[in-house]
């Protein structure tokens, strides 16, 4: 029996050591600052532990699947910087077209799809060769990019054309243009992939697209915190819980985040944050939400149980995106 116990313990230790390094998570918070030209790193106690100098105008950020690398689109140097999460150093630069703003990985991480704002194109970059393999024309000033779970369809917003372009990723062809509100910015997909939510900044609206038909479902949604006018609301960033029950929507110059019942579309709470709430991300356990406030140069942490702000932390000039390694 003693020998069996020793063998079992050894097997357990081996299994644990084989788990990917990100399973434990560092708990670090990463914030890109557009005018600081850096990614600011905070620890679990919200202390700034490092300012990582990047290429100019860092904006959208994404981890790879095992969270060993953080990719950062740097709009003024036409590159995506790659940060090693273990060393907190920039270890690579991926060239892009003019002014990369938002990007997404293909499900197998073999490609990056990036909106090139000044070139009016959706660029597809092969990760192995670091070469552009597709260059897909869009309306002017493309921004939001998202890829379906099966990798067959990409969606990209055009801020000037007020459209969502539907792209067949196999052929690179735009198969449909969906007219939405004024200045569409970002997307979320519901966990089952059935709905695509689109934020339209200057018309203060959210549109919901049925991904089976690529048609707009129902009327657009408008969320206005008490004391604000509809024209004060400039929705941009969104996040959705893993069970698809709640959507968090940053309301831009209305300085609030709306927490929304994803089925009824009722507002559960308006949460006061910093100035020009922009990007929002949820912790893995969904107990906290993190909001980048572009005009108050800070991030706000929201307690999801009480749906109230906990603390705002200064980070640097014009925070754009926030990601949590947990």
Image (cartoon, rainbow, N blue to C red):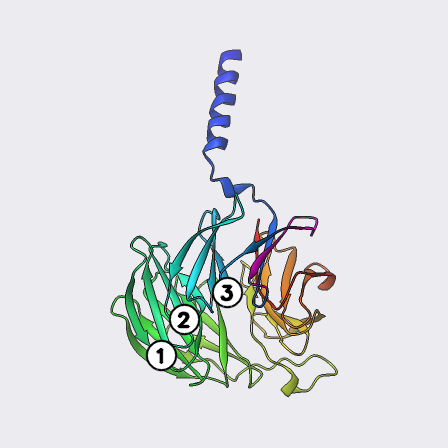
Q: Which residue is drawn at 45% across and 63% down?
A: 192
Q: Is residue 186 left or right of residue 204?
A: left
The secondary structure type at the circle numbered 1 is loop
From this view, report whether residue 118 is shown above or below residue 54. below
Residue 221 screen position, x and y as percent: 56, 81
Discs 1, 2 touching: Cβ within 8 Å: yes
Please provide percent x and percent y for residue 114: 39, 67
Please state which of residues 322 and 5 is positioned toward the viewer in this rendering: 322
Q: Nearer the viewer, mark 3 or mark 1?
A: 3
Instruction: Check residue 115 in the rendering and tell me which mark sits there, or answer none.
Output: 2
* Residue 70 position (above or below residue 151): above
Residue ID at (30%, 71%): 135
Q: In this view, does 26 lie above or below 192?
A: above
Quadrant of res 178: bottom left
Cα distance in 3D space between marks 1 and 2: 9 Å
Question: Where is mark 1, residue-wise?
Answer: 138
Give the mark nearest the N terminus, 3 or 2: 3
Q: Mark 3 points at which residue?
A: 56
Tell me where the magenta segment starts and ends, as one range: 36-49
């Amino acid at each position: 029996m003693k020998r069996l116990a020793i063998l079992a313990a050894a097997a357990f230790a081996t299994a644990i050591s084989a788990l990917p390094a990100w399973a434990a998570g560092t708990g670090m918070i990463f914030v890109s600052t557009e005018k600081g030209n850096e990614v600011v790193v905070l620890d679990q106690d919200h202390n700034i532990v490092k300012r990582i100098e990047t290429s100019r105008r860092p904006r959208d950020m994404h981890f790879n699947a095992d969270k060993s690398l953080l990719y950062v689109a740097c709009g003024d140097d036409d590159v995506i910087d790659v940060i090693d999460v273990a060393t907190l150093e920039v270890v690579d630069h991926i060239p892009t077209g003019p002014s990369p703003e938002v990007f997404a990985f293909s499900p197998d991480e073999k490609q990056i799809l990036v909106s090139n704002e000044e070139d009016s194109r959706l660029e597809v970059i092969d990760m192995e060769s670091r070469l552009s393999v597709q260059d897909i024309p869009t309306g002017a000033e493309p921004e939001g990019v998202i890829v379906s779970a099966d990798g067959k369809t990409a969606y990209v917003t055009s801020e000037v054309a007020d459209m969502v372009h539907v792209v067949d990723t196999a052929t690179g062809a735009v198969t449909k243009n969906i007219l939405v509100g004024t200045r569409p910015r970002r997307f979320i997909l519901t966990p089952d992939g059935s709905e695509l939510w689109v934020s339209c900044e200057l018309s203060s609206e959210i549109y919901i697209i049925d991904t089976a038909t690529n048609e707009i479902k129902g009327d657009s949604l408008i969320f206005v915190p008490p004391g604000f006018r509809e024209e004060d609301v400039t929705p941009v960033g969104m996040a959705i819980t893993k069970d698809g029950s709640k959507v968090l929507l940053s309301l831009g110059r209305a300085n609030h985040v709306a927490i929304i019942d994803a089925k009824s579309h009722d507002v559960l709470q308006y949460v006061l944050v910093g100035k020009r709430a922009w990007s929002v991300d949820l912790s893995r356990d969904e107990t906290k939400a993190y909001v980048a406030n572009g005009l108050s140069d800070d991030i706000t942490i929201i307690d999801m149980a009480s749906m109230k702000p906990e603390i705002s932390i200064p980070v640097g000039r014009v925070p754009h995106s926030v990601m949590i390694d947990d």
